[in-house]
Amino acid sequence: MDQNINVTPNARESEKALLGALLIDPAIMGQVSIKAEEFYLHSHGMIYSALQSLGAAADITTIAELLKQRGQLDEIGGQAYLMKLVHDCPWSNNWEKYETAIIETSRRREVIEAYRQGATAAMNEGTDINQAVADVMTKLVNLSQPRHGTEPIKAHIERLYKSVEDRARDPKQIYGLVTGIEDFDKITHGLQKRETLILAGMPGSGKSILAFQIAAGMAEKGHPGCVYELEMSSEAILRRKASAISNIPVDNMRSGIGMNDKWESFLQAIEKLDRLPMYLTDNTNWDTVQLRADLARKKEKYGIEWFLIDYLDLLKAPGYDKYEKSEYLSQQLHGIAKDLDLAGLVIHSLNKAGYESAGMQNLSGSAKVSYDADQIIMIEADREDSKLVTLSWKKMREGDSRRKMKMMMKPGIPEFYCIAPDPEPTLADYLID
């Protein structure tokens, strides 16, 4: 905001950023309390008004169509300007800061206008000066009331009480999204919404196989979700899962050898896969803006509860170097999970030092990636038996981050099963009878 006293207070850049954030994730509209007339630029107010009208169903196309119907599309700069707002949005998670800046400058303009009206009334000797002063004071008092801020602790305690009360009515060890891998679920309590879980390991450790097994397991348990397969083809990833379901080795499916005798089992596996509430893409040109928009639409239309990214480094982030990119992407994915109330499962790579002994410090890119994640799991292949892996929890915001479990891949079949869970501590250790 320009501090020159002759310049009308405004927050044009914040207006653009907020509109971009709303176009990326229309669900935010339910939390925004700004009014269209509070925008400094009238064209921005038009766009915001259209967003208000469409709500969670809004996207660039529907907004453009509505503005066209209202005869305002050319005035705001056309559909190209809407796309520019999306691509220029610095970070949609910061929408509250953008909103605050817009509200603050709008209030400053209102204060200036209130004093202007007061000065005009004072210059007019026919005006009741006492009434004029009272009018100005009323406007200023109303403008001083904050819309956002801290709440009494009682409000937060009530939400905590309600959460614990709901759990007490229906106590269960797995209160997140069940994956179907029993020992994994016991440690994590299921994947948690509004959190991101990073699964990292060196090449060939089986992290993609395990991640898709977790994703498919959640879908099998009735939790719909999206898979963004940026590394492999959708055919390859589904062939692996069909192999796991049918117990037909992948090599048979790829070569066709012996498939005539196994065709019925293959068809049953395909039919089971077809029924899963899962949405899959193997397009490699995803960035976090497109990702957020796609997930917001899928949540609105299909009620998705999770997403899988395979893998972090393959998401697009033009203009960032290696370290800045990983930091930016991890922040964005954490924000997407939190804002859209989704569980995020993200595959990540290790630096070369992590090939010997992996810890949080061995995640590729910026060290800040480990700060954003709510859980970090390392998967390490046994040096003598490549089918045997160990999962080690390196971070768990609410839980014991020292847990481990061993898993074995079925012979010839790309699916893991637990062979040696770490039994200590159990949930009973934390509960009071």
Image (cartoon, rainbow, N blue to C red):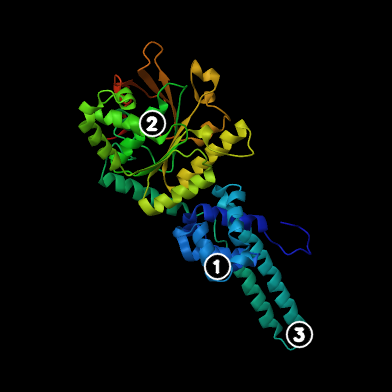
Residue 419, by quadrant, is top left
- Specify few, some or many for label 1: CA neighbours under 10 Å numbering under 14, 14-19, or 20 or more: some
Q: Is residue 325 left or right of residue 292?
A: right
Q: Which mark is residue 124?
A: 3
Q: Which of marks 2 and 1 precedes in the sequence?
A: 1
- Specify few, some or many for label 2: CA neighbours under 10 Å numbering under 14, 14-19, or 20 or more: few
Whole-Å distance between the Cαs marked 2 and 3? 81 Å
Secondary structure, mark 2, is: helix
Whole-Å distance between the Cαs marked 1 and 2? 44 Å
Q: Which mark is residue 68?
A: 1
Secondary structure, mark 3, is: loop
- Specify few, some or many for label 3: CA neighbours under 10 Å numbering under 14, 14-19, or 20 or more: few
Q: Nearer the viewer, residue 267 or 163?
A: 267
Question: Mark 3 or 1, which is nearer the eye?
Answer: 1
Q: Is residue 303 visible?
A: yes
Q: Which mark is residue 236?
A: 2
At a point 46% along the width and 51% down the height, the residue shown is: 153
At a point 51% along the width and 47% down the height, the residue shown is: 290
Residue 270 vertical placement versus 131 (above, below):
above
Q: Which mark is residue 35?
A: none
Residue 68, by quadrant, is bottom right
Where residue 306 appears, x then y in whole percent? 39, 42
At a point 46% along the width and 55% down the height, the residue shown is: 27
Q: Is residue 181 visible?
A: no
Where residue 394 appears, x then y in whole percent? 45, 26
